[in-house]
Image (cartoon, rainbow, N blue to C red):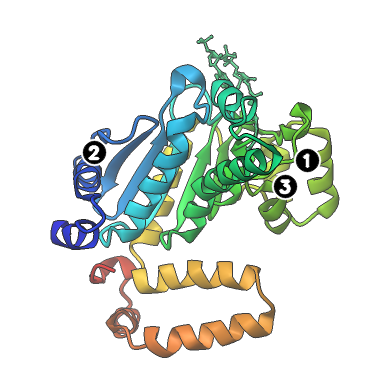
Amino acid sequence: MTFLFRTAFRKQGLLIPVLNAVRGMSTGSSTPPFTTLSISRPADTITHVEFCRPEKRNAMNKAFWSEMVDCFNQIAEDSECRVVVFSGAGKLFTSGFDFMAVATDLLQPEGDDTARISWNFRQIIVKYQEAFSVIEKCPKPVIVAVHGACTGGGGMDLITACDIRLCTQDAWFQVKDVDFGLVADLGTLQRLPKVIGSRSLVNELTLTGRKMYADEAKSCGLVSRVFPDKETMMAGALEMAGEIASRSPVAVQGTKINLIFSRDHSVEDGLKHMASWNMSMLQTQDLMKSAQAAKEKKSPKDVVFSKF
Ligand SMILES: CCC/C=C/C=C/C(=O)SCCNC(=O)CCNC(=O)[C@H](O)C(C)(C)COP(=O)(O)OP(=O)(O)OC[C@H]1O[C@@H](n2cnc3c(N)ncnc32)[C@H](O)[C@@H]1OP(=O)(O)O
């Protein structure tokens, strides 16, 4: 793995931070390049990313935006990682944007005239958007585990970019942007309508900024499971991650990529994409290994799949 990272990143001058991060991932320690994210490896094929600013209720500061991109790009390249669990440290999941970061980025715009100020704003928004889009672009499934609050501008943006959402009974969710005179611009308005079935509920939540509690989040499909407390949720998240990680990584990552493609395209285009995808992916040895295991009434967990 180290060799692969060396080859991929030497030219870009990224070798040192990436190697540090990967070393951190494999030892279970906090990674030196990240100040807002703590990375650990609860199992060989599972990466746990923990949002780690508990004293500021996991508010999204300046470092967070670039660290998310670096972290998930590294995970995408890490052929040993098959699934990711994302959670928040401390009392709650996230309080959204950091007030201080908002104050410097948005209230003191840089630029000599409207065009330049507008352009700089656009660059900032695009950079912030990428911190969540990178989760969706990462081919490894991401399970997000929410406890306490998931609020502010940012909380819903983050979790709607994840593949599976779990929460605790005390969790609450809020799209708070409207309370600040803002239109949510980092993915909530684009992804939430595709996550929950009711357009009316999406409109209500985003236009009023009201809190939604765990039971309603479960009944509308925002989360798929509710756990009594954080400890049982994390155990449940890791168990689910273990189930996913035991399946063929070719099948798992192909499923994520094609589900997201199909969400954003017509059935016809999705089927065409699928046919092109599988004309090569069906040639994987994972297929024969899995079929053989099924024939012998073994579990997928008994099959050893190559790194992917
Ligand atoms: C280009 C895109 C434009 C987007 C703009 C988006 C803007 C925003 O989203 S602004 C932020 C929105 N977030 C909120 O309104 C949530 C604010 N926080 C809270 O309501 C409460 O903190 C919360 C209910 C989440 C938790 O309450 P609790 O009693 O547990 O904690 P506190 O005593 O309030 O806070 C503890 C320390 O954390 C600091 N903190 C909390 N939230 C933020 C935040 N969003 N940014 C920065 N810091 C935050 C709080 O100041 C306390 O710090 P300290 O006084 O140093 O102990």
* C-alpha distance separating marks 3 and 2: 35 Å
Relative placement, left or right, of 308 versus 279 is left
Element carrying mark 2: loop
- Bin the neighbour count of mark 1 within 10 Å (Cα to Cα): few under 14, some 14-19, many 20 and up: many
Element carrying mark 1: helix
What residue is pinned by disc 1?
A: 206
Residue at horizontal 43 percent and vertical 43 percent from the top: 68
Circles 1 and 2 in contact, beta carbons < 8 Å: no
* Image depth: mark 1 or mark 2 in front: 1
Label of residue 28 in the image? 2
* C-alpha distance separating marks 1 and 3: 18 Å
- Residue type highlighted by circle 3: Ser
Image quarter (top left, top right, bottom left or bottom right) of the C terminus: bottom left
What residue is pinned by disc 3?
A: 219
- Residue type highlighted by circle 1: Thr
Residue 152: quadrant of the picture: top right
Element carrying mark 3: helix
- Bin the neighbour count of mark 3 within 10 Å (Cα to Cα): few under 14, some 14-19, many 20 and up: few
- Bin the neighbour count of mark 2 within 10 Å (Cα to Cα): few under 14, some 14-19, many 20 and up: some
- Residue type highlighted by circle 2: Gly
Image quarter (top left, top right, bottom left or bottom right) of the N terminus: bottom left
Of the image marks 3 and 2, the number of the one nearer the N terminus: 2
Of the image marks 1 and 3, the number of the one nearer the N terminus: 1
